[in-house]
Image (cartoon, helix red, strand yellow):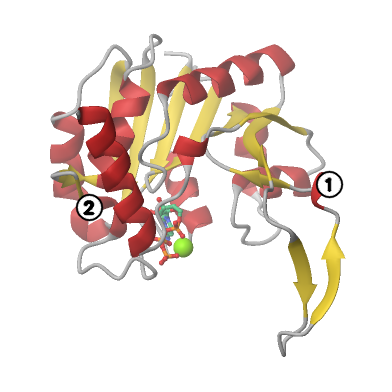
Amino acid sequence: VQAAVIVVAAGSGSRLGRPEPKAFAPLAGRPMLSHALDGILALAEPVHLIVVAPAAELEQARAIVAASAGPALGYTSVVAGGATRQQSVAAGLAAVAPGVGTVLVHDAARALTPTALFAAVIAAVRRTGAAVIPALPVVDTIKRVDAAGAVQETVDRSELAAVQTPQGFVRAELDEAYADPAADFTDDAALLASFGHTVGTVAGDERAFKITTPWDLARAERLLAETAS
Ligand code: CTP
Ligand code: MG
C-alpha cells in the first residue's frame, strides 16, 4: 500500500464527560470509532489503517477494526497511545508500514468525515509534494480578549481559517518532525511548520466537525438519523 491513515482515538474525552473514552462512546448504536473507520475504508485505494487507542481499550479497538470493512481495507494495526495527542500520533507513526509515502493523521472524534475529504487530501499531498490540511473559512467574528474577559481587538477574519483532519503528509517530512519535535503541538501541521515545511490547504467539509461536547454528539446523532431516513 502507498498510503497510511493514522486514526488517533486515545484521548479520554474530558469535555464530552462520558464514562468510556470518547472514541468508544456510543453514536447511533455503535462506537464513534466505528463510524470514523467507515469513511476511511470506503476509499477506493487500499491503505494501511492504524488505530491508536487507550492502552486499556486495545481489545475493544481490535474488535471494532475487525468488524469494519470496505474497499480500502489493506493492512490494519492497533497500537496504544500516549498522554498527549502528539504522543499518540508518534505511536501510530512508528507502526506505519515500509513503502508508504503518504501519511494521513485523523481524529476519531471527527467521526462523520466523508470519504471524499480523505481522497482529496491524499490527492493534494501527491500533487503538491507537501503537507495539506482541510480548512474552512471562519464564520464568527473573532475578538482578542484579556484574562479578565475584556475585549482588546477584533481579529481580521479574512486571514483566519478553521482547520480539520485528516491532515496529509509526505511521510519523510512527518518522520523527520517526529524524530525531534520542538514542542507539544495540538496538530501535526503546526509541528511540520516548526520545521519550516510548507503546509497547504484543501477545502474542508462541515461534516468533518470534531465531536467535543455533548452538544456535538447530539448533532452527530441527528445527522446520522437524517441520512438513515
Ligand atoms: N487523542 C489521542 N491521544 C491523546 C489525546 C487525544 O489520541 N492523548 C485524540 C482523541 O482521541 C481525538 C483527537 O485526538 O480523536 C482530538 O482530541 P480531542 O478532541 O481533544 O479529544 P480528547 O483529548 O479525548 O478530549 P478532551 O480534550 O475533551 O479531553
Ligand atoms: Mg484533548
The one nearer the camera, 183 or 149, is 149
Residue position marked by numbered label 2 in the rendering: 24
**Residue 64 shown left or right of residue 53 in the figure:** left
Height in image: 105 above or below 88? Answer: above
Q: Is residue 91 left or right of residue 104?
A: left
**Crowd around label 1: few <14 · some 14–19 · many ≥20 (10 Å):** few
Q: Residue at x 38, y 55 (%)?
A: 216
Q: Give the quadrant of residue 147.
A: bottom right
Instruction: Pick the residue in front: 162 or 59.
Output: 162
Along the horizontal axis of the image, is 96 left or right of 172? left
Q: Quadrant of the C terminus?
A: top left
Where is residue 189 shown, x and y percent of the image?
66, 43
Q: Is the shortest distance between ligand 1 and the CB of mark 2 under 8 Å?
A: no
Residue 63 appearing in the image: yes
Residue 11 can be seen, yes or no: no
Residue 188, image quadrant: top right
Residue identified by numbered label 1? 159
The location of residue 108, given as percent across then percent down, is: 37, 44
In percent of the image, x 79 and y 33: which residue is there? 198
Q: Residue at x 45, y 36 (%)?
A: 207
Name which residue lies at 69% across and 49% down: 190
